[in-house]
Image (cartoon, rainbow, N blue to C red):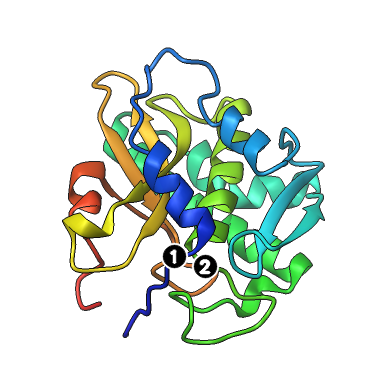
Amino acid sequence: MMKLFFFTPAIICLLLSACASVDVNEPRPYAGYFEQKKLTAPAPKSFDVCRGYGCASRDRVSLSSAEWGKATAPLRQTITNAPAERAAIAKSIGLMERVVGQKTGTAVDVAGTYDTLGPYQLDCVDESTNATVYLAMMEEAGLFKFHKTTRPTARVPIFVAQGPHQTAALIEIKTGARYAADSWFHDNGHPAEIVPMGEWKMGWTPQGD
């Protein structure tokens, strides 16, 4: 599927800040990003999500215990290593999108940014912000053993033959390795793509895209 890329003020600002190093011991490294976006500290009973390109519109969402449990079910299985946890995180991001999409109208969101237009579509700023909200709630709920959530990261277009792009991000606690958790490449509800950050920054896309 052809992806169209456009510079937006939100992305341009992120290009200057997203490469800052993050200490694995830093508590809630995503908190400053939430403050920048004027998002409240998220909890399953009350959290904000973005839509409409560059977080132009926001919706306050509340999940029931059953909805939260269903969305995070992959992380409640027996997980014994970091790769297995990343696979479970990817599935849970997709499940969160399904639950939230039914409440906000974003169930109609399609892959990429401008293949379909409208207030219920998401660009990479919306996607990465929402994924970071979901990751932060999962981490706060004690569902991560091997990772922590960090602030979104952008890749600089001068390094790849693409436009600017932004992703949610994770840090593996034991190794300090950073991973992109990118939900932008697929339609709403699809598991996120979690790949090493170095590969992602060099223009990684899913095979066939």
What is the secondary structure assignment of the residue under circle 1? loop
Left-right relation of 66 to 123: right
Residue type beneath disc 2: Asp
Question: In this figure, which residue is indicated by the disc labeled 1?
Answer: 184
Where does residue 127 sit, x and y in percent of width and height? 53, 59
| In the image, residue 203 above or below residue 71 | below
Where does residue 9 sit, x and y in percent of width and height? 52, 58
Residue under the point 81% across and 43% down: 46
Contact flag, marks 1 and 2 (Cβ < 8 Å): yes
Q: Nearer the viewer, mark 1 or mark 2?
A: 2
Residue under the point 30% across and 32% down: 82
Quarter of the figure that contains the C terminus: bottom left
Q: Earlier in the sequence, mark 1 or mark 2?
A: 2
Quarter of the figure that contains the N terminus: bottom left
Residue under the point 19% across and 43% down: 198
Which labelled disc corresponds to residue 123? 2
Where does residue 194 sit, x and y in percent of width and height? 33, 50
Left-right relation of 19 to 112: left
| In the image, residue 151 above or below residue 22 | below
What is the secondary structure assignment of the residue under circle 2? loop
Instruction: Judge whether residue 140 can be spotted in this image.
Output: yes
Left-right relation of 36 to 26: right
Residue under the point 44% across and 65% down: 184
| In the image, residue 126 above or below residue 13 | below
